[in-house]
Image: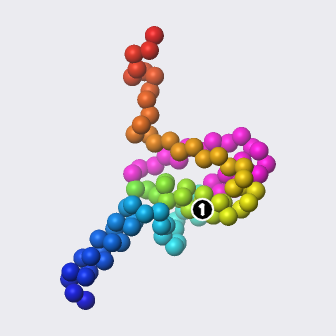
Amino acid sequence: MDMGVCACEAQRILRQRICGQDLPPLIMGYDTEIRELEELIKRTATVGESNSILVIGSRGSGKTMIIKKILMELDEVDEVKQNLLQVHLNGKTCVYKDNMDVK
């Protein structure tokens, strides 16, 4: 295969992984976490449990990927889809009261 073609294909794949919404076909090593989060979200939407989820981990550890996978799967369940309100927070944009000049 031509090096130019390989480079273009590698760029396309990287661009899709960084910017795209596609998830890998198989996410390995997080089976327990995925199952627990999926059940928690499902119960929140269908039974009315009052739950919040805070996912913490180092950069690149798979937090966003896992949540996207779960939400994509639950989006196919009508009862969940109708009752689920998603709020996404980003730690980079949080403002802490201690850092503000509030009196």
Which residues lie in the magenta part? 35-59
Amino acid type at image mark 1: Met
In the rendered image, the vertical position of residue 77 relative to residue 8, given as above or below? above
Q: What residue occupies the far bottom of the structure in this picture?
A: 1
Question: Looking at the rendering, in which quadrant would you find the C terminus?
Answer: top left
Pick the residue in front: 14 or 60: 14
Image quadrant in which you'd find residue 1? bottom left
Q: Which residue is mark 1?
A: 72
Image quadrant in which you'd find residue 49? top right
Residue 70 rendering spot, x and y as whole percentages:
60, 59
Magenta stretch contains residue 98: no
Which residue is at a point 77% across and 44% down the rendered structure image?
48
Q: Is residue 35 left or right of residue 3?
A: right
Residue 66 rendering spot, x and y as whole percentages:
53, 59
In the rendered image, the vertical position of residue 55 relative to residue 67, given as above or below? above
Magenta stretch contains residue 45: yes
In the rendered image, the vertical position of residue 52 relative to residue 75, given as above or below? above
